[in-house]
Image (tube, rainbow, N blue to C red):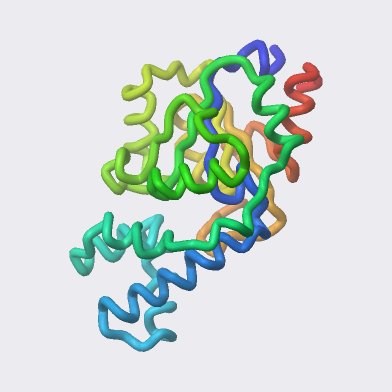
Amino acid sequence: MKIKKKINTWIFDLDNTLYSADSGIFQQVHKLMGKFIAENLNMDLPDAKKLQTKYYKQHGTTLRGLMDNHGVDPDFFLNEVHKLNYSIVGPNEGLNTELKQLEGRKLIYTNANKQHVIDVLDRINLTNFFDEIFDIKLANYIPKPEIEPYKQIINLYDIDPSTSAMFDDIAKNLVPAKKVGFTSVWIDAGYENFSDDIEASKEYLDFQTRDLSLFLKDVNEGKI
């Protein structure tokens, strides 16, 4: 069966998925995270950056490591590290056209916070397009790829995994997606995230693409 006939719920990651990975947004976030750690844990910046990377690898997000080990307030952290210059992000009209042709619900599932999602969607001309935004706060600050929030999003939005597809640029985030029954689509952005484990994730990837807009075009034309 073709994907478009099978799927009625489309779940998308946000960062480096609905906009280009080379936009520069995540570089800003990483810089602000290092600055936050240095200032709030009284560390010099090189040590702060090492801790940032360590917690990201060990906990799925730097935030979770800071919460578990230092009692950092998550909302304060998220507000500080998303003080970004969003003007560097722009719309991909080809992608937007294909997204709008998909039938069924469209959701965003992100390890970021909702305000960041709103700010990005405004820049890429998709304001109020998605039916739901499942952010890190709704996930009780439990990040992908922990499986609990995947189960939570199913229950919260009454999702049938067998008719749902999830898209993410980090392969290991699709392992639990496949385990709960989603069709999994990896967007290979042409870089290797330092915490990703692509080889170990491959058996859980139903599809992979280097261009989400072209992939969705094939879906809409019934080629996949």
In percent of width and height, residue 26 lies at 54, 61
Query: Eyeballing the image, is 31 above or below 216?
Result: below
Residue found farthest to the bottom: 44
State which quarter of the image contains the C terminus. Answer: top right
Q: Is residue 78 visible?
A: yes
Q: Tell me which residue sits at (59%, 17%) in the image.
A: 7
Where residue 34 sits, quadrant-wise, is bottom left
In percent of width and height, residue 79 lies at 34, 58
State which quarter of the image contains the N terminus. Answer: top right
Q: Tell me which residue sits at (37%, 29%) in the image.
A: 153
Q: Tell me which residue sits at (67%, 19%) in the image.
A: 3
Query: Could you tell whether 82 is left or right of 186 in the image?
Result: left
Query: Could you tell whether 75 is left or right of 57 in the image?
Result: left
Where residue 176 sits, quadrant-wise, is top left
Front residue of 35 and 197: 35
Query: Could you tell whether 13 is left or right of 18 in the image?
Result: left
Where residue 60 sits, quadrant-wise, is bottom left
Q: Tell me which residue sits at (22%, 60%) in the image.
A: 73
Number of numbered discs visible in the structure rendering: 0
Q: Is residue 178 visible?
A: no
In percent of width and height, residue 212 lies at 70, 38
Query: Eyeballing the image, is 27 above or below 112?
Result: below
